[in-house]
Every structure is written in structure tokens, then in C-alpha cells.
Image (spheres, rainbow, N blue to C red):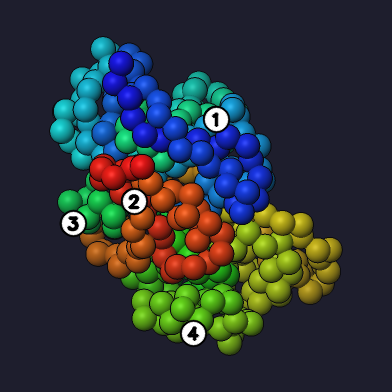
Amino acid sequence: METMTAWRVERPGPVATHPLRKVSLPVPEPAADEVLIRIRTCAVCRTDLHLAEGDLAPRHPGTVPGHEVVGTVERLGEAVSGPPVGTRVGVAWLRWTCGQCKYCLRGAENLCPYSRYTGWDADGGYAQYCAAPADYVYRLPDAYSDDEVAPLLCAGIIGFRALRRSELPHGGRLGIYGFGASAHLAAQVAIAEGATVHVVTRGEAARELALSLGAASASATEPPEPLDAAILFAPVGTLVPPALAALDRGGTLAIAGIHLTGIPPLNYAEHLFQERRLVSVTANTRDDGREFLDIAARHRLRVTTTAYPLAEADRALADLAADRFSGAAVLHCAEDGVS
């Protein structure tokens, strides 16, 4: 039996307790509707950290996290006719939906109550191989390297959906709270579409990155003018009231994360009156992914990454928790040298 190296969430807990464990697992067999993918890179997402630390309850024991997977098709399930073996593809967070519920039928498959997710319901990309339903993998823009394209598959797609959920008007003023992997991609799309972007983040390096990407301002405290829309990427509920207060009349705050700490009480007059809106973001549809990757192909985004060998996946996750890098961490899963 062919085996592979992978990392599993053995016992969720603080990242300092090393909740990830390196193991040897059988290379998965693709189901009839799946493709087997030889993984080249997998970006490290904050959702992986929430899963490892227990903020996101595991769906089954010993999950292999990772849902920003780039690799090549190795084998097709018996009911699959494509993509051809050898094709570079991407695997994202949304793994499967029923296609028959009222949400799927109205084009909101991200709200499907039966939906399944990569690296949560099924093993993901902190490994050398994974299997994924063929209808849910993406063709990838050729202009990006494996390292660059991996963060587009969650950080990029979710940031794009959050941008659309914020209902930013054309030429509007957008506030971005937190400036990690997702935010630095969403900011570039907004700027390319004519927005003025103001970034609020505590990290000096992140503020410098924001300005280098074209943000109009980068502050540790508050934006310099009222906002037409805002996106909260930092999983910090205490930022909700000031972000709402920074909105102009009719503005929308979109919360992009899957996990958020407690939100303090809101003052109706200060935070919500004058038709300010607070909305959440739940996963993405495949159409979101295709539209974003098309935009990424037309507007060459600058993707900031830090590379780690697969052997150091636990260190990459710890560095994410401690904000030790800007942009996104990317695991090199095809490299030999796993101890």
C-alpha cells in the first residue's frame, strides 16, 4: 500500500501544545466522482488554526487540515471524464453541496445545510495527496506560481465574497480591519476597481505592505474619513463597534471570518442608525471562485507568501498565530525531506 506524509489534528488545543501531529497515511483512493491530486503546495489559513485550537469543532477525529490546495491530477474516479491527468488544479474550502435544497436551487450553495468542506469534513492539503470531487476543483490562472496561486483559493475567494457582501459602491471608500492573507488580496481587487482603501491593523509590517499595495492610509487606530463599506478580517469581536461607527450613512460592515470573539453591546444610534448594516460571510459558491480567479487572471495581483516545507507545518501554524509574517504561509508538500 502506497503511503504519504500528512499532518493531523490529533488533540485540539492552543497551538503551543502542538495539536498537529505528523503521520504516515495511505494515499487516498478517489471515489467515483473524485480526482486524486498530487499536492504541490497548500496555503495555511486562519481557519486551519481555528480547527487546530478547537475554536472550530472537529467534524471527525484526526482531520488533515488545509483547503488552499494546488496540485496536479494524478488519477480520475471511474465516473469522471476530466480534467485530464497532469492538469494543475486547485481545491478550495467548499467541497460538496447537495444541489437540491432551496439554497442550492437559488444559487446560494454556500448556505446548503448539507454542505461539506475540505480539511474539515474530509482530509485536506497538509499532505502529499488528497482526493476531491471533480466538480469542485478549479482550473488555475497560468500567470501565477504554485506559491502565489494557493492563497487565492481561500484567502482570495473569501476576501472577494466579503468585498461583494460589503456592497461597496463604485469609487467608494472601503475600510479593511486586519491585513493578513485575505485582506491583502481583497484590497488589491477593490483598488483595481476604483475604490479608496483605508487599512486598520496593529502590525507595522502589515501597514507598510498595505501602503505598498496602494492603500490610501494604514493606521493602528481608525480610518481618516467616513467609510462607504468595511470588511472585518481580524477575528476580533471588539472591533465591530468601532468599525460600524466609522461607516457613513447607509454603509455596510461585512465580517469575513468563520470564527469571531464576542461582540460588545452595540449602541443603536451610534452603530446602526442611518441604515448602517452588519452582515456575515458564509463560505463561497463555486461561481464566486470562478469569478475571482477570472479577475485574478486579468488583474495581476501581488501575492505575498512565506514558504515552509511540509515537515514544518506545525511551525507555520504557530507563526500564523503569532503574526510572524505578512501575507500567507505556503507549505511545499511535494518536497522530500520530511523527517
Q: CA distance from mark 4 to mark 1?
A: 43 Å
Indicate which disc residue 309 carries: 2
Residue 317 visible, this orientation: yes
The image shows residue 77 at horizontal and vertical percentages of 28, 17
Residue 147: image quadrant is bottom left
| Relative image position of residue 314 (x, y in whole percent) | 48, 49
State the residue position of label 4: 217
Of the numbered discs 4 and 3, the one sitting upstream in the chain is 3
Crowding at label 3, few (<14), some or many (≥20) Cα neighbours within 10 Å?
Answer: few
Which residue bears the numbered disc 3?
143
Contact, CB < 8 Å: mark 2 with mark 3? no
Element carrying mark 2: strand
Quadrant occupied by the N terminus: top left
Foreground mark, 2 or 4, reads 2
Q: What is the three-letter code of the residue carrying label 1?
A: Gly
Using the numbered discs, state the Cα–Cα distance from disc 2 to disc 1 in whole angstroms: 21 Å
Residue carrying label 1: 62
Q: Distance from label 4 to label 3 (Cα)?
A: 29 Å
